[in-house]
């Protein structure tokens, strides 16, 4: 309140700021609830998807072990190099409460055996099965990764919103309310002084009239 005059206009301005800050808290609390619900819904979805990812990962590890046992590690590595390619991913975005969240769609992650760049007759079946298992794990990983990142971003936004609510509730609103009380006390004191002066003036006038 330093440098501000204790006037009724200032008092009204401070009360207006309190109303705005209180409305801001209400809006932010609504936003926080919506963000938390969004986070919970996506976390439930991710839990199911990650369970599937873990199952595919265990299958990929087991199939790789069989492939290495049957064909040898050097051969498996050679087949892996021959089948190397870039993933066909499409990245899009969605807006959620002012946030930009990413979405990733993958096409043809799991290929047919003839699409892997190796001779089917020369490639042991365990190696082909290991390749398919690895691609199925990658397919699920592409699904899970953006959801997990979005959950992290939602969590960060919830924390940021909490900090804003706390700043309003614990700092700005108490400060404004204290300033309102101080201005009100000053105005009340001035009013009492003015009333006292008026009474003195009236008393002097009545004495002179006698």
Image (cartoon, helix red, strand yellow):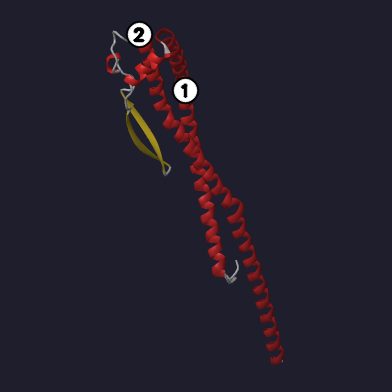
Q: Residues within 10 Å of mark 2 (few under 14, many from 20)?
A: some
Q: In which quadrant of the rendered view does residue 110 lie?
A: top left
Q: Which residue is mark 2?
A: 124
Element at badge 1? helix
At horizontal 61% and vertical 59% (from top left) the residue drawn is: 175
Question: Residue 40 location, x and y as percent?
Answer: 50, 32
Q: Is residue 85 left or right of residue 189?
A: left
Q: In which quadrant of the rendered view does residue 191 lie?
A: bottom right
Question: Residue 30 location, x and y as percent?
Answer: 50, 43
Q: Is residue 50 left or right of residue 122?
A: right
Question: Residue 77 location, x and y as percent?
Answer: 39, 18
Q: State the mark number for residue 48.
A: 1
User: Which quadrant of the rendered structure holds the N terminus?
Assistant: bottom right
User: Which quadrant of the rendered structure holds the C terminus?
Assistant: bottom right
Give whichever of 81, 137 is nearer the camera.
81
Q: In which quadrant of the rendered view does residue 104 lie?
A: top left
Give whichever of 102, 190 is nearer the camera.
102
Quote the CA–CA distance across marks 1 and 2: 33 Å
């Amino acid at each position: 309140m330093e440098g501000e005059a204790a006037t009724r206009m200032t008092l009204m301005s401070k009360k207006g700021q309190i109303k705005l800050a209180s409305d801001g808290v209400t809006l932010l609390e609504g936003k926080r609830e919506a963000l938390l619900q969004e986070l919970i819904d996506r976390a439930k979805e991710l839990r199911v998807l990650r369970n599937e990812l873990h199952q595919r990962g265990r299958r990929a590890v087991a199939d790789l072990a069989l492939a290495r046992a049957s064909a040898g590690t050097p051969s498996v590595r050679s087949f892996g190099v021959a089948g190397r390619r870039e993933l066909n991913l499409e990245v899009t975005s969605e807006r959620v409460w002012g946030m930009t969240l990413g979405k990733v769609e993958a096409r043809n992650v799991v290929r047919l055996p003839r699409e892997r760049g190796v001779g089917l007759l020369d490639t042991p079946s365990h190696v082909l099965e290991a390749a398919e298992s690895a691609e199925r794990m990658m397919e699920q990983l592409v699904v899970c990764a953006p959801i997990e990142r979005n959950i992290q971003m939602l969590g960060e936004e919830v924390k940021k919103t909490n900090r804003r609510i706390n700043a309003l509730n614990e700092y700005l609103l108490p400060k404004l309310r204290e300033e309102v009380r101080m201005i009100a006390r000053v105005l009340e004191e001035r009013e009492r002084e003015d009333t006292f002066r008026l009474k003195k003036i009236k008393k002097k006038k009545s004495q002179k009239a006698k």
